Image: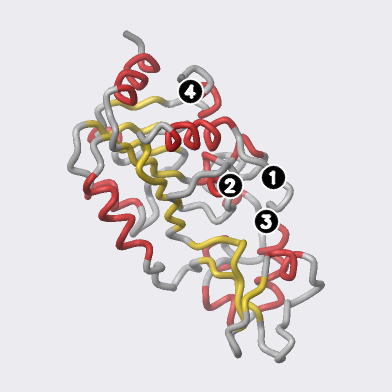
Amino acid sequence: MDKIEKLQEMIDNSNNIVFFSGAGVSTDSGLKDFRSKNGMYSVKSKYPAEYMLSSEMFYQHPQEFYDYYKENFNCLDKEPNITHLYLKKLEDKGKLKGIVTQNIDGLHTKAGSKNVYEIHGTIYKNSCLKCGKSYGPEKVFQTNGVPMCSCGGIIKPNVVLYGETLPACFTEAQRLIMEADLLIVAGTSLVVEPASSMVRLFQGKNLVILNLSPTPYDTMATLVIHDELKNIFSKLK
């Protein structure tokens, strides 16, 4: 039995699956990941990517923050790929209980998945720091310079920047992983805390890791496949 067949068997035999997704899940939609050789962290900028995406950068240099953010995270024209669509199908079958994602691109929701835990937030929600008024992503990405509220306050994307705490859904995502029978981790290097440590919470039967390059958790997994996700999910039914 090859690895794809083994994965299919695990999926067929489980009705309590949780999918943990990283940036690599969205590369087939035309988005960059972070740590691959062509990823966002390989692009030269004035400051390291971690600092460009930090709360300190946002509050002290909002113009530079937004220049970087708008250049790299405007994915309004991107569409779900084969992985997102396969997960929607699994959810419809009642097998997939939830998706825990580090991605802020909203593509799982765009694919129609309902039970999505966006532990790093989403580009689709933005709010004024002064009055709290909510704005859609178009206000941010179609504004020249720093997007401002009608009250005069700065609009901030509801994404988790370096130096910020995780949203309330993080606790529910942890519970979901702890109760899962099959945890499929895909498209993430598993080096960012605290999200990556969630894998250690898994107590179920099978841990599957799907990623182009090795991760620190490969030795813990029941099954590891190092391949492009489109090659994997195109063979599953």
* Callout 3: SS: helix
- At horizontal 69% and vertical 45% (from top left) the residue drawn is 78
- Camera-near label (1 vs 3) is 1
Give left or right: position of 221 versus 75. left
As measured in the structure, the alpha-carbon distance from the residue carrying label 2 to the one carrying label 3 is 16 Å
Q: Residue type at mark 1: give it.
A: Lys
- Camera-near label (4 vs 3) is 4
Q: Earlier in the sequence, mark 4 or mark 3?
A: 3
Locate residue 30, reporting x and y percent. Answer: 67, 40
Q: Earlier in the sequence, mark 4 or mark 1?
A: 1
- Camera-near label (4 vs 2) is 2
Instruction: Tell me whether the residue at label 2 lies in contact with that at label 3, contact meaning CB atoms closer than 8 angstroms.
Output: no
Q: Residues within 10 Å of mark 1 (few under 14, many from 20)?
A: some
Foreground pick, 52 / 21: 21
Q: Which residue is mark 1?
A: 78
Q: Which residue is mark 2?
A: 107
Task: Please identify the residue farthest to the top as the structure is shown.
Answer: 1
- At horizontal 50% and vertical 62% (from top left) the residue drawn is 121
As measured in the structure, the alpha-carbon distance from the residue carrying label 4 to the one carrying label 1 is 21 Å
Q: Which residue is mark 3?
A: 72
